[in-house]
Amino acid sequence: MASQGEPQVLELGVHAQVFEICAAPIWLYDSTFSVNVWGNQAALELFGVDEEAFKAPQLEQLGQFTPEQLRLWKKLNAQVHQDVEVEKKEVNVTVASGEPVPGFMKLDKPKLVLKASYKPIRLRSGPDRERDLTLIQVTAQVAPTVEDNQLRLVEMCNNHPMFQFLFDESGKLLAANKRALCNMREHLGSCENYNLQNYLAIGECDGSLGPDEMYKEAMEAIFVLDQPCHRFPQLRWSKRHPGKYRWVLYEMWPSIDPVSQQKAVLVCEQNISQVKALEEQIKKQNQRLEAQLEEALAQRDPVHKPAIDIDTPADKTLKLLDKLMRGHEVSAREAIELRDAIIQAGDLRQPVNFNEQLMKNSQTVLDSEVSQSLIQLLSSRRPAKVRSTIKEEEEEGDEQQGAGPAHAEQDLRHIYARSNVTQDSVKALIAMHKNLPDEVLDVLAKVDDWQFDAFKLNEVSGGRPLSLLSYALLKRCEVTDKFQMDDHRLVKFLMRIEDGYPNNPYHNRIHAADVLQSLHVLVVRGGLIGHGYCDEVSLTSCYLSAIIHDFEHKGVNNDYLIRVSDGLAVLYNDRSPMENHHLAASFQLMNSDEYNFLRKMPNKLRETLRKQIIEMVLATDMKQHFAIHSMFQAKMQLNGSVPSGGNGSGGKTMRTSPHTTNQDGHKVIDEDQRSLVLQVALKCADLGHLASPRIVHKKWVQYLEEEFFRQGDREKQNGLTVSPLMDREKNGITKSQVGFFDIVALPLFQSFAQAFQEATPMLDAVKDNYAMWREEAAMYTSATTQRSSK
């Protein structure tokens, strides 16, 4: 006896004679190659073939079946392989003549029904040769008579709760089940010549067509237009309950009269009043269950809700439509609120009254200067409370007779660092990559971790964190070989880009390396590659976008460049001047022969690469944050997000619709959706230090605060009003962290983790740092309150 979970071992040389004397057909089937391996004489006689034909590949014998039957056969064969040969289960099946079933050949006997069992068996053909097969045994044969089947069908038809009729082309009644005849006699009385037109006339129309028109339309649909099914409702008055009405639904299918062999129509009548009542009951029950589920999920992993309403009009519209599609009722108040939001909005992809909401919250939740800082970061409009400073700035500018902007531009020219890339330094980095020091290997060993210390990488790399990490990742993913990149030109480009990062406190080469590592982890471990959003071209785009995304950053924000009429602001018409410069300056380098490491890449792929890089880097402008975030949520929800159930856990997932698949059954990603996913991934990576260990994250915040203070110093030097949180004589961005996490960071990372559950560890790390800032804010508030009370 085989132990539980293991099949019995069969040796044909020993057991074949035993099987041969069995009267029941028994044979061995190999689902992997779709062939019968051996069968006893009863099995050969059952199918009427010799041993050679019995062992022929079954797929060659299925030519007479339709494509749908072949698809079903393959599905059943895969199920037999999994259930019987892999999971070692016994399966019982019923097979009728003419049905394609794995292991069974064509049955010439008509109306034959076989009952068979599929059992796991292990065939031993030598001392060390065993393979798992399926043992098929026919356990019963049934050949029901036509008369028996007719009696059963008549009984089923007569007692079916749905009224069923068969009419000919003239509408004359040919047959009806017992319940239908009783109903017809109840309404038509002693009428002997029952017909469809008379029967339709006993009800009232649905408000659009009368009974005669409904009859003509139905007959034309079935007998002229050959529609597979024609449906329409009718209001029927109740004879049993005078004064009451009920809705019935007619369904009509084209048929053939089995007696005359003429065209006919099969009519079914269904009481949909009862169905509607049941649907309403199920609908209410479903709503209760959804509410309970929402509450349970909220308690298990509460979804963060910002202090203000950051939903855009587009978000609000999609949520209302989603509510309607779920069958929920939408109140007039909700519709009016949505209408007002659309009317008030200057941009459907920006939160409604964002500036006003923030300034209102500055009286309660957020500090006034924090609110103004967030408005400057995220909105193209000036905050309401600082509009009074516009005139002051203009007057200050008049006093300087236009010297302010020129002075400012003079101040910023020093940021374009000179590159010290030499042939020897390029060769040294390539050689270093081939034989990395132990301290470098130790840091790079953590490159796939969700939390990373780019400062440590800068130390061990001798001040080359970006070029070293970039080259290592590009070589590791083998895109350098795939696209025949010139190693020398590639390293020279990476080192030149690295030298183009000025020695800013925050926007420097260490930040670029940190963003690159964060994006690498999101792509590789966060689900983008696993779910088909990142192919080899897109992976290259991701790495290059992170590498160049802050190239030649001036250490000030776009608002400052626009205020002082910097050359970049003038060149790019005040629209993302810094991001446009990062791209243009990088591509100018890349297109020169000295740095053109992609010269062997096909033009079409280069165009795709360039397009993706441009879209990703431009998306890092925080003025575009809400538009991109809103579009990402809409695309992932409406076009189908990545299926849930990855390695991540917790949080609610978006409701999704299935992806389109190609002929091979693989998922087809919409290119607009792919672009948005890559943009949001880079946005998350650009804020990647929010998910760093607390000590590393705080270090980044301190450097960013210093960079802001330096901008404030420049603004003072040029006689401009100092931007919010940039005056080093006051509190800096440290006190704005809770507001930034609340309104920007958590909603962004939460949306990404909802679409890609594998990225949940990054969201969890962001939440941990958010908790830290909330704790510090509470301690600061408590200390301030104690001092004021004294």
Image (cartoon, rainbow, N blue to C red):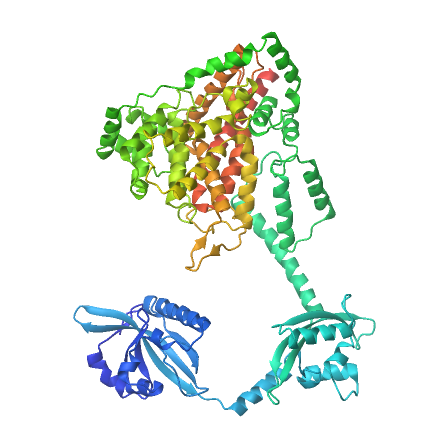
At x 48% / y 89%, what residue is drawn?
144
At x 50% / y 17%, what residue is drawn?
711
Measured as percent of width and height from the top left, residue 100 is found at: 41, 76
The reply, left or right, for residue 547 in relation to residue 265 is left
Residue found at the far left of this picture: 127
Q: Say how many tags the image has.
A: 0
One can see residue 437 in this view = no
| Residue 205 position by quadrant | bottom right
Between 86 and 100, which is closer to the camera in this rendering?
100
Measured as percent of width and height from the top left, residue 191 is found at: 78, 87
Q: Is residue 770 above or below residue 328?
A: above
Measured as percent of width and height from the top left, residue 165 is found at: 67, 81
Q: Is residue 133 above or below residue 500?
A: below
| Residue 54 position by quadrant | bottom left
Between 747 and 174, which is closer to the camera in this rendering?
174
The reply, left or right, for residue 468 in relation to residue 663 is left
One can see residue 193 in this view = yes
Q: Quadrant of the C terminus?
A: top right
Q: Quadrant of the N terminus?
A: bottom left
Measured as percent of width and height from the top left, residue 616 is found at: 46, 36
Between 606 and 548, which is closer to the camera in this rendering?
606
| Residue 495 position by quadrant | top left
At x 31% / y 26%, what residue is drawn?
464
The reply, left or right, for residue 636 in relation to residue 269 is left
